[in-house]
């Protein structure tokens, strides 16, 4: 039986730059041989059980055998890098015949460790000259390099930074409410301590000593509260992880900066919570207090209509509280809008199969197998249509970028756009409307190499009112725009519609990674059973991977759903 696994490529220097632990094997020589493979602990247990995996063989495809030379230790859950299997990068073409040497896309990341004192901007400025010197002429127009700090990579690809700031803002708002509440309660309780303060002043205590006493009391209260808060966080953390679908942990021994941060936050909280009550209480006048006359922070009279700090704090408390409630309502409405908004394509009754050709040894085998699968599925009466594509809505474009130069533009001006490979059935299957021009046709031989379809965002970016018939240049290749589709959302609604180029790769191609099946009925379980039956018939021994488009788009808003829950609980 064959399994579908994610295999990553790396060179030996990767483990010299990054401190990934190996529980078994030698870190420095684990990838020295082309036929070596490093597996995760999970993969080692899956394939070898309790046996020692070192020296055992894993077969990838039909002709590629790899010897296990290392087992990865546990990688932190918040790491950008999470690998199941790693092989030397020289195997990329052997394992993945889909890869080519073209420059329209890339599948490897290069990590560069700069010397201390190096200016990243100065280095980046040298990249164009590097490309001019070392790259072929047809590749120069399609290759650009840029540096990204490693600390930014995680949020860049997960999009979590904006939500992290929102949660930080909520936490600060709640903390501010707690501080204001403590301040108001301390002042409200001042009557109970008024005679104590008066007696201490009569006995010789000065204002500075009283101020210090009250600040110490506040710091002790905040300290105890901080300990209780840490304990409560430990108890609630599993539920929080369940809500946000993460695996956060309070590991102060591994992350001392977390403990330092909590101590700093506690100290700042104690200071701002206690400074005004301490000043207020230490101002009491002994005579007024002992006579039990009306007093207010040492003053027996207040001007009518005056707005003191206590009133400001009360108003602020109400404003922040109401603001949190309003923010909760806005977020909930926004999420509901995103989920119900028309994405400009038909996602109902659509099931997508992953038809990655990399699971086969040759292009011919992949084309023949998936060609047969498409015919078998299409023959069913419950199937309306079947489409092939490199990507599908809900999955995103991956790293599919291409540099395009519109006709009439200077050769130095290019547009860095997304692209997707589709067949002629893709647009009608997804119900994507044409704003102008025509769709790809299996009858038009020139469509495969010379024709493209762009979306309205691309036409707008160029500034063409009617782009049909105009040319786009990709290095030395020239393509004619035959159609313009109306803008549709390929990704979650939080992402703007990007300029996209649609390439046609014929009836069958190893550039198609997905098979989208449009059903006439709304019976997902029956439809899935049908697809499983057809898959097992045509592609036996290989695990079927599929997803429902409508469910996939609901999952895209999981982060927003989690955020709404947290805000609701907080409010």
Image: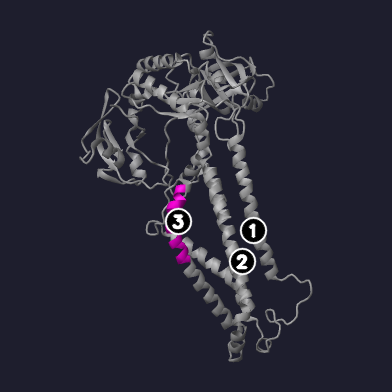
Residue where numbered disc 3 is placed:
236
- Circle 1 — which element? helix
Residue 256 vertical position relative to residue 107 in the rendered view, above or below: below
Colour logic: one colour
Decide which of 174, 511 is in the foreground and name it.
174
User: Where residue 157 sits in the image (x, y, percent)?
Assistant: 49, 39
Locate residue 186 relative to residue 508 in the image: left or right: right
Residue 300 vertical position relative to residue 226 in the rendered view, above or below: below
Disc 2 from disc 1: Cα separation: 10 Å
Locate residue 81 relative to residue 205 in the image: left or right: left
Contact check, label 2 and label 1, Cβ < 8 Å: yes
Report the disc number at residue 180.
2
> In the rendered image, is residue 29 in sight?
no
The residue lying at 45 percent from left, 52 percent from top is 239
Disc 2 from disc 3: Cα separation: 25 Å
> In the rendered image, is residue 381 in sight?
yes
Quadrant location, the C terminus: bottom right
Locate residue 75 relative to residue 503 in the image: left or right: left
Disc 1 from disc 3: Cα separation: 25 Å
């Amino acid at each position: 039986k064959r399994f579908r696994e994610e295999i990553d490529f790396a060179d030996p220097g990767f483990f010299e730059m990054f401190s990934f632990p190996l529980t078994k094997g030698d870190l420095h020589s684990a990838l020295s041989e082309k036929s070596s493979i490093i597996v995760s602990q999970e993969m080692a247990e899956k394939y070898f059980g309790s046996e020692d995996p070192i020296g055992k063989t894993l077969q990838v495809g039909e002709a590629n055998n790899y010897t296990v030379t290392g087992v990865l230790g546990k990688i932190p859950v918040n790491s950008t890098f999470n690998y199941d299997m790693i092989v030397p990068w020289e195997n990329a073409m052997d394992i993945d015949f889909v890869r080519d040497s073209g420059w329209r896309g890339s599948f490897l990341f290069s990590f560069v460790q700069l010397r201390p004192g190096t200016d990243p901007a100065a280095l980046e400025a040298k990249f164009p000259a590097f490309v001019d010197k070392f790259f072929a002429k047809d590749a120069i127009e399609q290759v650009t390099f840029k540096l990204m700090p490693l600390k930014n990579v995680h949020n860049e690809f997960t999009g979590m930074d904006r939500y992290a700031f929102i949660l930080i803002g909520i936490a600060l708002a709640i903390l501010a409410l707690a501080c204001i509440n403590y301040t108001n309660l301390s002042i409200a309780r001042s009557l109970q301590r008024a005679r104590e303060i008066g007696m201490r002043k009569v006995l010789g205590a000065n204002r500075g000593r009283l101020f210090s006493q009250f600040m110490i009391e506040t710091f002790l209260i905040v300290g105890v509260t901080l300990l209780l808060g840490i304990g409560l966080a430990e108890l609630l953390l599993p539920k929080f992880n369940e809500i946000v679908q993460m695996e956060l942990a309070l590991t102060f021994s591994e992350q001392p900066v977390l403990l330092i941060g909590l101590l700093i936050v506690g100290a700042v909280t104690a200071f701002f919570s206690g400074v005004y009550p301490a000043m207020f209480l230490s101002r009491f006048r002994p005579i007024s207090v002992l006579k039990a006359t009306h007093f207010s922070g040492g003053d027996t009279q207040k001007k009518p209509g005056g707005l003191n700090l206590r009133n400001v704090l009360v108003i602020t408390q109400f404003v922040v509280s109401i603001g949190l409630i309003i923010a909760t309502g806005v977020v909930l409405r926004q999420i509901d809008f995103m989920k119900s908004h028309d994405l400009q394509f038909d996602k109902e009754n659509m099931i997508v199969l992953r038809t990655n050709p990399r699971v086969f040894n040759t292009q011919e085998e992949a084309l023949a197998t998936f060609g047969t699968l498409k015919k078998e599925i299409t023959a069913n009466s419950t199937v309306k249509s079947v489409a092939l594509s490199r990507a599908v809505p809900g999955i995103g474009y991956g790293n599919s970028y291409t540099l395009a130069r519109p006709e009439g533009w200077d050769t130095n001006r290019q547009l860095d756009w997304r692209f997707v490979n589709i067949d002629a059935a893709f647009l009608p299957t997804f119900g994507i409307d044409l704003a102008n021009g025509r769709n790809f046709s299996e009858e038009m031989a020139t469509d495969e190499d010379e024709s493209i379809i762009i979306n309205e965002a691309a036409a707008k970016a160029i500034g063409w009112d009617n782009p049909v018939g105009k040319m786009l240049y990709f290095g030395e290749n020239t393509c004619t725009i035959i159609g313009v589709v109306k803008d549709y959302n390929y990704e979650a609604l939080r992402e703007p519609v990007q300029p996209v180029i649609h390439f046609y790769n014929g009836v069958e191609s190893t550039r198609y990674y997905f098979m989208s099946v449009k059903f006439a009925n709304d019976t997902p379980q029956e439809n899935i059973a049908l697809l499983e039956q057809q898959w097992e018939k045509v592609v036996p021994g290989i695990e079927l991977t599929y997803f429902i488009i409508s469910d996939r788009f609901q999952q895209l808003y999981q982060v927003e759903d989690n955020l709404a829950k947290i805000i609701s609980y907080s409010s």
